[in-house]
Image (cartoon, rainbow, N blue to C red):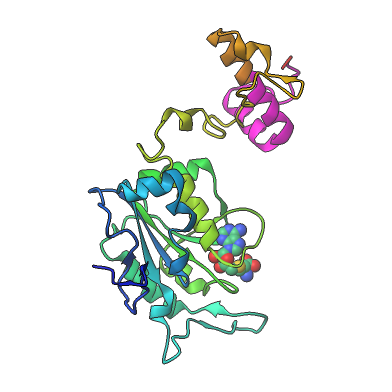
Amino acid sequence: MKPTKSHGRLSIGATRKPRDLMTETPRLKGAWCAKIVTLFPEMFPGILGASLTGKALKDGLWALETVDLRMFGEGKHKNVDDTPSGGGAGMVLRADVVSNALATAAQGAPRDRKKWPVVYMSPRGKPLTQAMAQEFSEADGMTILCGRFEGVDERVIEAYDIQEVSLGDFVLTGGEIAAQALIDATVRLIPRVLGNHASTEEESFSHGLLEHPQYTRPAIWEGRAIPEILQSGHHGNIDLWRKAQAERLTKERRPDLWRAYCDLHDRDPDEDQEL
Ligand code: SAH
């Protein structure tokens, strides 16, 4: 599909077909693809268009398509929502409208949810973790439904075997920021998206711990020196120091992660180590 240009911007034409946001760029065969079902396709690629994720998108290492929910709306006014059954404040996205958009997104995507997860961004979902991002990055791609208003009719969530994923215990006005956060966490795990793949193996959560503190020049800043050991050149000791720091921070800040880590490594979470 060739995008029509108007005033130098990709036009948002009245089409029910998914819109490929980067058609002018190559898409590498088998590249991971995110299909976003949203009332606001113009919000994409958004932040993902910048920096490393943006460069990787341009290089075709991953791809992005939006499905405009409005195009599936009912009647002259393209209504997508209605009042909640049983009463109450706000509006709910209609099951038939969302279903038609999801069916369009499903075209050309594997039906196996392992190969192609279908996710609804929702505060009621499982909180997003590094392990989930890792799993998503190993799929062929995924469909992400962004809610608005009071959310989506429950029946469509059941019918499409949709996984609900939350960005955290707070309420946003829409799923688009959450979707961009999820995609960012996911695509950076795709090989070659980050120049330096090793950096994702060492960082927070990859070993169940928060990352150790980081330092760089100047060696002394406003009277504060970099820990001496980091300047010793002794890599064995540096690794030990970093691990001890990572354990200390995790124990202090995230008792939940610390307990899980201790279980896994057969350690007593209350042990009094000289860290
Ligand atoms: N009435 C809902 C909140 C709706 S907020 C409730 O109380 O659970 C509107 C939309 O924003 C949701 O449909 C969802 O897609 C998105 N959203 C809000 N908070 C979110 C969060 N913490 N994580 C992911 N998506 C969220």
At a point 74% along the width and 14% down the height, the residue shown is 274
Is 6 in front, or is 73?
Answer: 6
Residue 108 lies, with reference to residue 57, above or below; the image says below
Above or below, 244 against 115 in this view is: above
**Name of the residue lying farthest toward the bottom:** 76
Give the prevailing secondary structure in the magenta stretch.
helix
Is residue 263 a member of the stretch shown in magenta? yes
Side of 136 relative to 206 (left or right): left
Q: Is residue 213 left or right of residue 13?
A: right
Counting the numbered discs, the total is 0
Quarter assignment of residue 245: top right
Q: Residue at x 36, y 45 (%)?
A: 56
- Position of 162 with respect to 236 (left or right) is left
Report which quarter residue 273 is drawn in. top right
Quarter placement of the C terminus? top right
> Please, is residue 247 above or below residue 15 in the view?
above
Q: Position of residue 74 (x, y in %)?
A: 42, 87
**Would you place residue 113 above or below residue 38 in this image?**
above
Q: Camera-side residue: 226 or 1?
A: 226
Stretch of the chain drawn in magenta: 244-273
Residue at 47% x, 85% y: name it.
79
Residue 158 shows up from this direction? no
Whole-percent x, y for residue 261 in the image: 61, 29
Residue 13 locus on image (x, y percent): 34, 77
Residue 258 shows up from this direction: yes
Question: Splitting the image into four quadrants, where does ligand 1 fall?
Answer: bottom right
Is residue 249 shown left or right of residue 99? right
Residue 91: x percent and y percent? 59, 80
Considering the image in quadrants, where does the N terminus appear? bottom left
Residue at image x 61%, y 67%? 173
